[in-house]
Image (cartoon, helix red, strand yellow):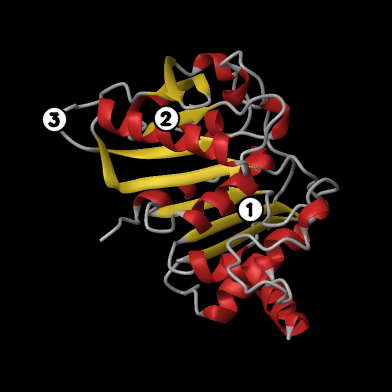
Amino acid sequence: MMRTMLDRVTLLVMLTAVWMAGPAQAATDPGSIPFVDRSVTTDAGTYRYEVFVPAHLDKHKKSPVILFLHGSGERGDDNRAQTKNGIHLLIAQDLDHFPCVVVCPQCRADSFWTQPEMETMALKALDQSVQEFNGDPKRVYLTGLSMGGYGTWDLARQFPEKWAAIAPCCGGVAPPRRRAASPGNDQPAGAPPADPYYVAAQKVLHIPAWVFHGEADPTVPVSESRQMVALLYSLGADVKKGDLKYSEYPGVGHNSWDYAYKEKDLLPWLLSHKLR
């Protein structure tokens, strides 16, 4: 059965992967993007985060909001590193007219986005920003790269009612050391563990998803994204409607975010979705 689903996703790759004439252009300097500093306090302590605020924000109108989860290399507490990869490329496509508030929390150096403390912090930073900048709860989008891609799938699984659309990049559901685990599994004691990919796919099925991965990724196997896309497709996600998209970049390694966040259709695709 899984082989059949992976054959289906091979077809999806052929249908949705972009043909690249050459490597991505040099990344835009993240320092050219004006972020504002904020902080949030949880039971575990105080964390700083950054927010991109649209140049022409109208506080009398609700704005769409993007929550961005960075990769493992940007962990820390400097409140700067988390914006150096990925999301600034999306914002820079139309800096002067970018319509979304973008919330960028920073994961602690010894932590992961899939840990409850970090997820609590990220969600509180998001909720705080929605309130401060009059964000639209019906147009909240979730994206992340690498470790943040894992966080994207995990937050989508846990809070599927919160996201109008998600865009995980070079992430997955079960890191190698935890592939026998069962996130969200309520199996009786002694029962065999459920397939974590199938459990996650059932939870996020109704959320529009555009998934990105490099075909030659040596860090996070491309099978992580292929398997999730195959399962979502087999469970009924609508490719023709654009509720499920998959872009796999031929020959690209782990750094697929330099391609994903430069996709001209990514922002319009996100904004085309809204919670009912």
In the rendered image, the vertical position of residue 275 relative to residue 96, given as above or below: below
Q: Nearer the viewer, mark 3 or mark 1?
A: 3
User: To which residue does mark 3 refer?
Assistant: 60
Q: CA distance from mark 2 to mark 1?
A: 25 Å
User: Which residue: 41% across, 24% down?
Assistant: 52
Q: Nearer the viewer, residue 240 or 100?
A: 100
Q: CA distance from mark 2 to mark 3?
A: 21 Å
Which comes sooner in the sequence, label 2 or label 3? Answer: 3
Q: Earlier in the sequence, mark 3 or mark 1?
A: 3
Quarter in which the N terminus is drawn: bottom right
Q: Which residue is mark 2?
A: 125
State the residue position of label 1: 212
Asked if 159 appears above or below 187 in the picture, the reply is above
User: Do tag 2 and tag 3 residues touch (Cβ < 8 Å)?
Assistant: no
The reply, left or right, for residue 32 in relation to residue 38 is right
Task: Using the image as rendered, state which of residue 75 and residue 34 is in the foreground.
Answer: 75
Measuring from the top left, give residue 122's x and y in whole percent.
Answer: 49, 34
Q: Nearer the viewer, mark 2 or mark 3?
A: 2
Mark 3 Cα shell of 10 Å, populated few (<14), some (14-19), many (≥20): few
The residue under label 2 is which amino acid type? Ala
Q: Amino acid at mark 3?
A: His
Q: Residue 115 in the image: state x and y as whole percent.
A: 62, 41
